[in-house]
Amino acid sequence: MRQPQCGALPEAGSPVANAIGRAGFLHVIRDLGMKEPYRSLVQLQTSEIGEDLAWYLTSSEQVPSAVSLAVLLDEQGLVSAAGGFIVQAMPECDASRLESLEQTIKSLPPTSELLGQGRTPQELLGLVLADIPHHQVMEQQLRLSCRCNLRHIVAMLRALPEDERRELAGRDEPAEVTCEYCRKVYRFTPEELSGLAD
């Protein structure tokens, strides 16, 4: 973890909603490889991250989902463990299997407790899926990454209407484009922008 320090939570074991507030919106931006990214905005239901993600997936994407997330902090407020699971119904999933899975998930101890016991991702999977046959397809280290790069940003600028490109190039100051996923800033001098306007 590069940033193991968490902002001030009121007290150990308190709900995340106490730290982030109980009113607001979940704004989802997904790059589906189309001209424009897919955007969705839903009101927070509980301000618990896992519950609100499950609400979004079920209501906005129409995919029955269960999400449970947990973060454990040590005495200094540093992240000592973080994990969770997401389970989504596949098309034509049997309703009785969904009901059984829902009951299994409801009967589990809190995910924070399971993480505190040192449970591995495989053990969490076994507990969640219980009697549902499953196998591991892949194991992958999670990391924050973004597919933005200078070539994509230049292509996006070139796709602007010609009058907008000329207006940007005519300014006396550099222009900035900020990736809305990773927040990386790309700067273009007026000379670079003039090259795009031709």
Image (spheres, rainbow, N blue to C red):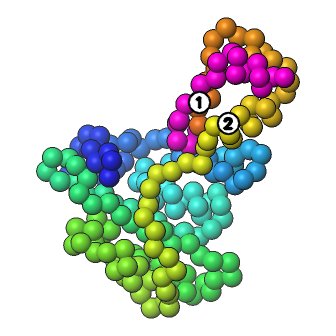
Q: Secondary structure at mark 2?
A: helix
The residue positioned 72% from the left and 21% from the top of the image is 193
Q: Is residue 42 visible?
A: no
Q: CA distance from mark 1 to mark 2?
A: 8 Å
Amino acid type, callout 2: Ile
* Image location of residue 186, percent across then percent down: 59, 30
**Looking at the rendering, which quadrant does residue 91 occupy?**
bottom right
* Image location of residue 170, percent across then percent down: 75, 11
Q: Which residue is mark 1?
A: 186
Q: How many marks?
A: 2
The residue positioned 24% from the left and 72% from the top of the image is 118
Residues 49 and 30: in front is 30
- Please, is residue 108 above or below residue 194 in the view? below
Marker disc for residue 153: 2
Q: Is residue 186 magenta?
A: yes
- The magenta segment is 180-198
Amino acid type, callout 1: Tyr
Q: Secondary structure at mark 1?
A: strand
Q: Residues within 10 Å of mark 2 (few under 14, many from 20)?
A: some
Q: Is residue 7 visible?
A: yes
* Image location of residue 108, percent across then percent down: 34, 77
Quarter occupied by the C terminus: top right
